[in-house]
């Protein structure tokens, strides 16, 4: 429980940072998705049950939907689909070095962006999008995917540290409970 709450808190703080940087730099849709590396980390972490990480990914997606003004459920679906694909693909064997973290996260972010574009075009066209040209969609997909890939090693390292610390805290709490019950 402590692990889940600490991961949600880290995601919230990263979203707040992303919003602050986005409002200052006016990057708009070219901003990296700082929560996606957390979803990928949850997908490669085998010690947490699939149902639990699926719920966490859904909550992270709902948090992104709420913060970005997307239709509620859009990024929720994309994050859970990403989690299942990462878990099914057994990408934890490939995510050993920083270069592979950048490459895999950029690829997953690009596929997620294409999924978002497809879902938006199927269900509701976005009147705020100025262009529907192939070049526009290519830039809107590739640039944020590369940016997300570049920040992925930093986010994954942060999440690993927070997760390890919260695991230690959880273990210590359980040990104290067992000692007090004895």
Image (spheres, rainbow, N blue to C red):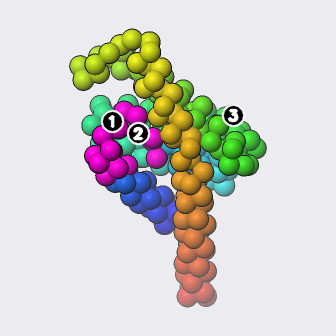
Mark 1, residues whose alpha carbon is within 10 Å: few (<14), some, or many (≥20)?
Answer: few
Residue 58 shows in this picture: no
**Are the residues tagged 1 and 3 within 8 Å (C-beta)?**
no
Please state which of the two labelled residues, at mark 1 or mark 3, is closer to the viewer. 1
Q: Are marks 2 and 1 in contact (CB under 8 Å)?
A: yes
Magenta-span inclusion, residue 20: yes
Magenta stretch, main secondary structure, is helix
Alpha-carbon distance for marks 1 and 3? 31 Å
Q: Could you tell me residue 170's position as x and y percent?
A: 56, 72
Task: Tell me the SS state at disc 2.
Answer: loop
* 154 to 173, vertically: above or below: above
Cα–Cα gap, marks 2 and 1: 6 Å
Q: Is residue 150 left or right of residue 137?
A: right
Q: Which segment is the magenta one?
A: 18-34
Crowd rating for badge 3 (residues with CA inside 10 Å; few <14, some 14–19, many 20+): few
Q: Would you say residue 94 is visible in this rendering?
A: yes
Image quadrant assignment for residue 167: bottom right
Mark number displayed over residue 89: 3
Is 103 placed left or right of 78 in the picture? right
Residue 114: % across, % down: 48, 22
Read off the residue under disc 1: 28
Tag 3 secondary structure: helix
Question: Along the line of sight, which residue is nearer the eye, 85 or 146?
Answer: 146
> Which of disc 3 and disc 1 is earlier in sequence?
1
Residue drawn where x is 43% and y is 26% of the image: 140
Q: Which residue is under mark 2?
A: 31
Where does the image place residue 33, in percent across and percent down from the top left? 45, 41
- Provide residue 128's location: percent of width, then percent of height: 24, 23
| Crowding near the residue tagged with mark 2, few <14, some 14–19, many ≥20 C-alpha atoms within 10 Å | many
């Amino acid at each position: 429980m402590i692990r889940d709450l600490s991961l949600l808190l880290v995601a919230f703080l990263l979203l707040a940072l992303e919003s602050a940087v986005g409002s200052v730099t006016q990057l708009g849709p070219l901003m990296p998705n700082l929560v996606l590396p957390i979803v990928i980390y949850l997908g490669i972490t085998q010690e947490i049950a699939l149902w639990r990480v699926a719920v966490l990914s859904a909550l992270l997606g709902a948090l992104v939907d709420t913060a970005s003004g997307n239709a509620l459920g859009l990024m929720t679906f994309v994050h859970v689909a990403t989690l299942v694909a990462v878990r099914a693909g057994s990408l934890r064997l490939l995510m050993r070095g920083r270069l592979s973290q950048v490459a895999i996260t950029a690829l997953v972010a690009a596929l997620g962006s294409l999924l978002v574009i497809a879902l938006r075009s199927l269900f509701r066209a976005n009147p705020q999008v100025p262009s529907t040209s192939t070049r526009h969609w290519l830039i809107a997909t590739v640039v944020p995917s590369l940016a997300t890939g570049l920040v992925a090693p930093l986010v994954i390292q942060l999440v690993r540290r927070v997760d390890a610390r919260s695991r230690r805290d959880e273990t210590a709490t359980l040990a104290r409970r067992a000692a007090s019950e004895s």
